[in-house]
Image (cartoon, rainbow, N blue to C red):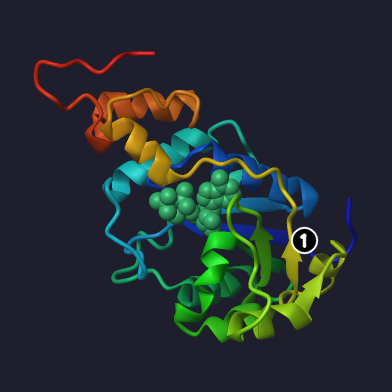
Amino acid sequence: MTTGLPLVACFGGTFDPVHNGHLQAAEEVRERADCLEVRLIPCHIPPHRMTPAAPAAARLAMLELALAGSPRLRVDARELQREGPSYTVDTLVSLREELGEGVALGWVLGADAVAGLDSWRDWQRLPELAHLLLLDRPGYTLPKRGAVAELLTPRLTTVMADLHAQPAGKVWCVGQTPLAVSATAVREVLAERRSAAHLLPLRVWAYIKQQQLYGYGSVPGREAESE
Ligand code: ATP
C-alpha cells in the first residue's frame, strides 16, 4: 500500500458502449497507480464529437452492468445530471469540491484524446485540478511539440508515488496493455449485425441484444444471432 494521499482516478468518456478496452484500462489504472477507486464518468453531451448513438440512460445502464462485481470500479453519473455540454474542467471542479484537498485526483485520458486536448475548455487548468493519467492507444503517440506538449512534458513523472504526494499536477503514463478495441468498432460490428460477444462484458452484450441498440437485430424478418 502506497503512503501519502489516497488517489481517486476518474475515467471520462462517451461509453457508447462501454467495452473491454475501457474496463481493462480502468482495472490497470487502479492496480498500477494504487487507486482507492476508479470512477467511470459517462458524459451527457460530448462537446467535441457527434451525439452518442445510444441514449444516456442506456449508456449508464451498460456501465452499471459492466461494473457489477468490481467494487473498486464504479460509475459516477454527475455529468448526466448536469445540463448542457460535459466539460471536463467543470467535472473536475465538482469532484474536487466533493473530495477536498486530502485526496489526490487523477483524470484518465487516452492518447487519442490527448492529441486534441488544446480544444477542450480551459484545458490549461486541468493539471491544477488533477493528475493526468495517460493511456496508450494503438496508432497514437503523445505530442512531442506544440502547446499540449509544453503543458504536459514538464509535469511528466515515472514515479507512481508522486501521484500520492500531492493532490494534482503530475502527468503519468499508465503503460497499460493496449487493447485495439474502440466503441466505434463495436458499433460497426453491431450495425452489420455481427456478434460483439467478445468485445464487451457478456451482461452488456445481452443488454444490447435485448434493447436492440446500435441497429443490432432491428431489421424486420431478420433475427440477430444469439450468442
Ligand atoms: P469511440 O470509438 O466512439 O470514439 P472510444 O472507444 O474511444 O469511443 P470513449 O468512450 O470515447 O471510447 O473513450 C473514453 C476514454 O477511453 C478515452 O480517453 C479513450 O481514449 C479511452 N479508451 C477507449 N478505448 C480504449 C482502449 N481500447 N484502451 C485504452 N483506452 C481506451
In which quadrant of the rendered view does residue 169 lie? bottom right
Query: x%, y% of residue 118?
Result: 51, 80
Tell me the amino acid under the disc marked 1.
Pro
Instruction: Name the quadrant containing residue 9.
Output: bottom right
Q: Which residue is drawn at the image coordinates 53% and 33% (left, top)?
A: 68
**Residue 17, visible in the rendered structure:** no
Horizontal relation, residue 133 to residue 63: left or right: right
Q: In the rendered view, would you say 44 is above or below 23?
A: below
All told, the count of numbered labels is 1
Identify whether 122 is placed above or below 5: below
**Residue drawn at 22 percent across, 34 percent down:** 215
- Does 141 appear above or below 189? below
Residue at far left of view:
220
Percent across and percent down for residue 200 are 48, 32
Which quadrant of the figure contains the C terminus?
A: top left
In the visual, does 190 lie left or right of 9? left
Residue drawn 34% across the image and 60% down it: 44
Residue 202 showing in the rendered view = yes
Secondary structure at badge 1 equals loop
Relative image position of residue 31 (x, y in whole percent): 76, 46
In this rendering, is residue 189 above or below 99? above
Q: Position of residue 23 (x, y in %)?
A: 58, 41
Q: In the depicted view, which residue is nearer to us: 126 or 217?
A: 217
Question: Pointer 1: what residue?
Answer: 6
